[in-house]
Amino acid sequence: MSNSSTPLVSADTEWSPLRSVILGHAANSCFPQAPSHMIKATMPEEHFEEFRPNHRFPAELLQRADEELAQFASILQEHGVRVYRPKSVDWSKTGGYTAAMPRDGLLTVGNTIVEACFAWECRQQEIDLAFANILDELEKDSSVKVVRAPKVARPEALYEGIGSRQDGAHEWAINNSRPAFDAADFLRFGKTLIGQLSNVTNEKGVEYLQNAVPEGYTVELLDVTDEHAMHIDATILPLRQGLLIYNPERVTEAALRKHKVFQKWDLHAYPHLPSPRESPPRYMTSGWLLMNVLSLDEKKVVVEAGDVEFAEYIKSFGFEPIMCPFQHVNSIGGSFHCATVDLVRQGD
Ligand code: DAV
């Protein structure tokens, strides 16, 4: 139980001191299933054929991913962060994907945790099966609010009409027939949330989220130049109040400056290109995943052990990177930001 000085859920930024977090598990993860136009829109081309029904990730890969997650958990605990872990689920039996990427499914805003209205049908039970026990426990505290996603009657309706445009203009992989959003398409900047429309987030999803967050919070949409968009956490990276690194392949400084919240910020295009990697394969992401770090506070940032160039770059701004191996977790779809859900970031 909490008292007024130690809330169980309270987060308004991506950088204030982290006190409590959910951290995923990799065991029994399977390649997610989605219609082929969705896979083509969002996944690396060289791995398309892996995305087929009941296809587990290699067992050794998952074992090493869980070892990396355990090491990350120790780092968090050594820094005084309370770590909640999900239940184990055999995703091959449920047609699901993973419990390793909770950031996609849960968004903390103030004292409220909002469950994503996943576009991908294979993810619609993910929170129920693996994370409901954590949410139920947190919700026993009367200060915490959890907004669960509505059940979807006809998941395929989200794809109707897609691909039938005659004018060749870009279209996302989903229509706007019901609310759809992944939580990882949004980041917290105080009372402002910055998000994006993407191949998994539509306008109704944004409206739904705006209605689900506590009063006083506003969702704004960033103009991104990324037709493959799915999750904003390798596009912009706020490292402390007033300092943001952005991915120049996906967003412009002008687009960022349109948002009042960034008007006085230092905005830096990341100056290096990510290096290619063959092994372990990045089955689901680009090399820009190097931006998917987790801030412990306004100085300490957890960075993938091999991303030395990135670590040196952020050191030049005064940050203290904590290097942690995470390549096998990266393989199955994300890095430190994806694998966690902030529950408490201490306010001012
Ligand atoms: O760059 O492939 C990764 C974000 C995963 N949540 C990328 C985006």
Image (tube, rainbow, N blue to C red):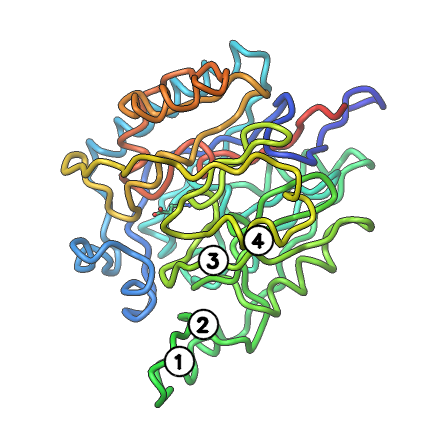
Q: Which of marks 2 and 1 is nearer the N terminus?
A: 1
Residue drawn 52% across the image and 62% down it: 197
Residue 249 image offset from top left, x and y in percent: 36, 50
Q: Earlier in the sequence, mark 2 or mark 3?
A: 2
Within 10 Å of disc 3 (Cα), the crowding (few <14, some 14-19, many 20+) is: many
Whole-number angstrom distance, CA of label 1 to CA of label 3: 21 Å
Label 2 vs label 1: CA separation?
7 Å
Residue 280 location, quadrant = top left
Observer-side mark, 1 or 3, equals 3
Which residue is at the front of the view, 293 or 137?
A: 293
Structural distance between the alpha carbons of marks 2 and 3: 17 Å
Q: Earlier in the sequence, mark 2 or mark 4?
A: 2
Which residue lies under the disc numbered 1? 162
* 25, 320: nearer the viewer: 320
Label 1 or label 4, whichever lies nearer to me, is: 4
Q: Position of residue 84 (x, y in %)?
A: 55, 27
Please, is residue 317 above or below residue 49 in the view?
above
The answer to the question of whether label 2 and label 1 lie on touching residues, with beta carbons closer than 8 A, is yes
Q: What label does residue 195 carry, if any? A: 4
